[in-house]
Image (tube, rainbow, N blue to C red):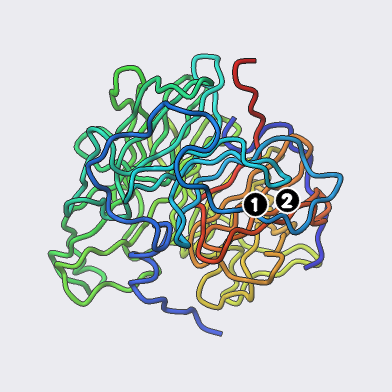
Amino acid sequence: MTSRRRVSRGLWATGRRPSRPRLTTVLVTGAACALAAACVSACSRSPVGTSGVRVTGTASPPLTVLTRDAGVSKGDIFIAPAGGGYPAGLEIVTTSGKVVWFHRLPAADVATDFRTQTYLGRPVLTWFQSGGQGAQGGPGGKGGPNGPSGTDYIYNDRYQQIITVRAGNGDATDFHEFLITPQNTALITADTVTTANLTSIGGPADQRVIDGVVQEIDIRTGRVLFQWDSAAHVPYADSYVPRPSSPSTLWDWFHINAVHLDTDGNLLVDSRNTWTAFKVNRQTGQIIWQLGGRHSSFTLRAAPGQALDRDGKIFAWQHDPEAIGGGQYTFFDDESGGLLDSSRVVTVRLDPATHVATLVMSDDQPEGQVAQVMGNAQTTPGGDLFVGWGGLPYLSEFSSSGKLLFNAKFPTGVSTYRAYLLPWNPHS
């Protein structure tokens, strides 16, 4: 698609940055955002060890660089690849494909959201890992209801563990998000299973459901400072996922997959299965606005050269809402189920005065493929866009004008939940 110049973004966007298809329940609950086949049930195993920088254990899956323009942004790539017959692990790799650090995980463990962040003024490595000491099994046993449950880790720049974080209030720590705030607290996602009375929407009185939860955690003490539960604020009727045939079968009606900070410090909460991103008051939990889905606060439009999907939406089955300033946001737009011919990253401008949301730019998957699950888009300091294509084995970078600067591919079957291009200078 034709693209317009994206606004300049001065922060890493990791937080500092036809008829409607009826996807099968298996696709959007069992596989969605579960690292496809790689997100197996968590097992009781030791956490990642501190031994060894560089490759430890069996080698990581190779990353083949297909395109590397001179304008590619500086930094190293942070990924947690899994699948394709390769060991799951944590990996730092250069944009030329050279492995800087790889740590193989114990068998049956997976990791997600591996990146650098800042904690107590120091650079740290953070990630989610299934299994591990003290890991929560979550409802139903070894895994959580929305994928593997486990533990969030913080390591220092000497690859040594500092502290771990887990969900409170008896909820299962979800693998989708682990964000350290400027206040040195952690924003995480969690899942809880409950029984809902759905008779008002033609369902049973005792349907088992998975509710998405946001928690802000005091990292030092583990105390829950704030909690937001999807069912308290969003109607079940907003879901695009068909109810299961049996009330005893879990209905993943919301599927929370991100919580980020807006530029004013309030929360951006993403729900894959309602096709909606919510702005949530960080103090009261009230919804300030919602974008997309069945009850959008905004009329959806496309700028010249852009196009809404076949359902008239800017995004569907989406991930990773990122505030980039000036009333603009990026989203990883999976578009599963034939709504578009390929996945893309969209840039959206919100006008609160007119209540109009305008699709101002889109960057399509370079091979024209659809990522059924997962994915993220991170804005670099220069205003470029670094993209992990989720369930597809590709990583890309686009310039602010939409030019493809970098494109690389894993072996078939390998995926990474998110990918980041970040500075990393240990011991500096």
Residue at image coords 80%, 48%: 400
Helix, strand or loop at label 2? It is strand
Q: Nearer the viewer, residue 278 or 147?
A: 147
Image coordinates for residue 335, horizontal then vertical, percent:
56, 68
Q: Give the residue pinned by disc 2.
A: 397
Q: Which mark is residue 387?
A: 1
Residue at image coords 71%, 39%: 380
**Would residue 279 appear left or right of 424 to someone viewing this image?**
left
**Would residue 105 appear left or right of 393 to someone viewing this image?**
left
Residue at image coords 16%, 57%: 195
Label pair 2/1, CB-CB below 8 angstroms: yes
Name the amino acid type tagged 1.
Val
Helix, strand or loop at label 1? It is strand
Number of dots carrying numbers: 2
Vertical comparison of 143 with 186: above or below: below
Residue at image coords 34%, 48%: 233
Tell me how far mark 2 sits from mark 1, CA to CA.
Answer: 6 Å
